């Protein structure tokens, strides 16, 4: 449900994914990474983290097996969690057995850690075993959502995110962090879905980079985003993108609300 890239701070919202089976319903909340806020946008992102922690029954603390465990552990400690936590050690397909064992030992020794799971999200290692320790810690209760819901967010949100994902993939340095996407039009027609979206930037120079030489970059973003959106919607789409300059939008409360933050 959430977009991914190699860049930090790709996730800006709290995104709920709802898994409903015969005997249980789990609502997963993916949140932004924890950062020291520098803009109002960052403050909104950290509010999303706080909200997720406040109403969670179980915390999943995800760490790359090849990361610095001491740094990750310090962040986890600073959360002062009031719910049981499972440390999820990811990317075990990219590490040796000895390092994986050391990581398990390290996190099991921490007070915040109730359980350790080792997985590889991309290759699927241990994914089938992933739910069992989570279910063991969840309280019984009535489902929060109807059985056919997979998220509480509208389709337009995910369309905007898929466009933003391509900006993160195709543009380097700091530019992706200065952009937002606003879906202005989403019309379902007989043969296709018409989507019109604005890509928001801070400065005119950034607008020029996004558009590219003779429109080459904006065309590439549109082409790749359209492919992903069609997969997501399972329908043909017509996608029109515009680039607009809104100086200091990351500090503007009204604009942040307009862009969904």
Image: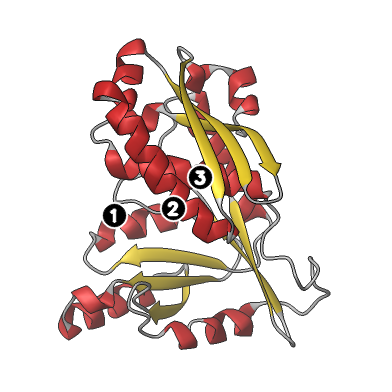
Q: Which residue lies at the image location 37% right of the left edge and 32% below the top edge?
A: 177
Left or right of 122, for residue 57: right
Q: Which residue is mark 1?
A: 71
- Say if 108 sits above or below 59 in the image: below
Give whichever of 226, 157 is nearer the camera.
226
Give the spatial CA distance, label 2 vs label 1.
38 Å
- Say if 170 sits above or below 231 in the image: above
Quick one: SS at disc 2?
helix
Can you give x and y, in whole percent of width and height, for residue 225 in the image? 43, 46
Closest to the camera, between mark 2 and mark 1, is: 2
Left or right of 143, for residue 103: left
Task: Answer with mark 3 or mark 2, whichever residue precedes in sequence.
Answer: 3
* Dot 2 alpha-carbon crowd within 10 angstroms: few under 14, some 14 to 19, many 20 or more: few
Image quarter hosting the C terminus: top right
Can you give x and y, in whole percent of width and height, for residue 250 in the image? 49, 22
Q: Which residue is mark 3?
A: 161
Left or right of 216, for residue 181: right
Closest to the camera, between mark 1 and mark 3, is: 3
Give whichever of 241, 133 is nearer the camera.
241
Residue farthest to the front? 191
Task: Answer with mark 2 or mark 1, whichever residue precedes in sequence.
Answer: 1
- Say if 18 sits above or below 52 in the image: below
Q: Which residue is mark 2?
A: 227
For residue 147, what is the image quadrant? bottom right
């Amino acid at each position: 449900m959430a977009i991914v890239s190699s860049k930090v701070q790709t996730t800006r919202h709290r995104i709920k994914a709802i898994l409903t089976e015969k005997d249980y319903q789990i609502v997963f909340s993916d949140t932004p990474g924890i950062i020291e806020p520098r803009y109002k946008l960052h403050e909104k992102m950290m509010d999303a983290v706080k909200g997720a922690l406040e109403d969670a029954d179980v915390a999943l603390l995800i760490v790359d097996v090849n990361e610095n465990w001491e740094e990750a552990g310090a962040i986890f400690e600073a959360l002062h969690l009031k719910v049981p936590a499972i440390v999820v050690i990811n990317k075990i397909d990219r590490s040796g057995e000895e390092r994986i064992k050391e990581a398990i030992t390290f996190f099991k020794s921490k007070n915040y850690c109730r359980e350790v799971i080792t997985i590889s999200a991309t290759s699927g290692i241990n994914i089938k075993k992933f739910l069992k320790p989570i279910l063991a810690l969840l309280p019984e209760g009535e489902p929060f959502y109807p059985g056919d819901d997979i998220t509480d967010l509208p389709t337009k949100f995910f369309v905007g995110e898929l466009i933003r994902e391509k900006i993160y993939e195709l543009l380097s340095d700091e530019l992706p962090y200065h952009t937002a996407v606003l879906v202005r039009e989403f019309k379902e027609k007989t043969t296709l879905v018409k989507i019109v979206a604005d890509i928001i930037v801070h400065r005119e120079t950034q607008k020029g980079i996004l558009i590219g030489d003779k429109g080459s970059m904006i065309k590439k973003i549109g082409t790749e985003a359209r492919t992903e959106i069609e997969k997501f919607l399972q329908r043909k789409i017509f996608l029109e993108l515009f680039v607009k300059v809104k100086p200091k939008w990351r500090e503007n409360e009204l604009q942040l609300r307009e862009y969904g933050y």
